[in-house]
Image: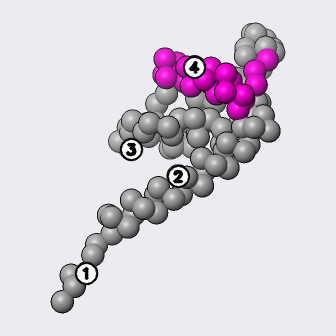
Amino acid sequence: MPEKLDVKQGTLALMILKTLEGLGPLHGYGVARRIEETSKNRLTLNYGTLYPALLKLEQEGFIKAEWRQSENNRRAKYYALTASGRKQLERETREWYQTADLIAAFLAPRREAR
């Protein structure tokens, strides 16, 4: 069974934006399940973590929300990426690749200079 991981600061917003980009509008439960599925269940999101992140992204204008009927006939808030959110996703993706490249340089085995 894979080890459960904590979400690093700033990564949840990126995961939410990427999930909405790929799947289109989803309710919070759907976003959480997709992130868990994509992580091969190495991440478990609780609502105390997910919903504040969704609210913050909505307040920043990166996602929009509207109430709709869910697949089981319940009212649910559906979230969708905005144009501003697409730009933010591009920006954050670029920054994460740069950060990962930087950290990889420090973690890679070094040859001793002679």
Say what secondary structure mark 3 lies in: loop
Q: CA distance from mark 2 to mark 1?
A: 26 Å
Front of the two marks 1 and 4: 1
Q: CA distance from mark 1 to mark 4?
A: 46 Å
Pick whichever, 30 or 110, lies toward us: 110
Say few, some or many: other residues with alpha carbon within 10 Å of mark 3 (under 14 / 14 to 19 / 20 or more): few
Question: Residue 74: which disc?
Answer: none
Query: Percent from the top left, x then y, of residue 3?
Result: 35, 42
Say what secondary structure mark 1 lies in: loop
Q: In the drawing, does residue 111 fall left or right of residue 31?
A: left
Name the residue that disc number 2 marks.
96
Q: Main secondary structure of the magenta part?
A: helix
Check disc 3 and give the amino acid type.
Answer: Pro
Magenta stretch? 46-66
Say few, some or many: other residues with alpha carbon within 10 Å of mark 1 (under 14 / 14 to 19 / 20 or more): few
Question: Residue 111: which disc?
Answer: 1
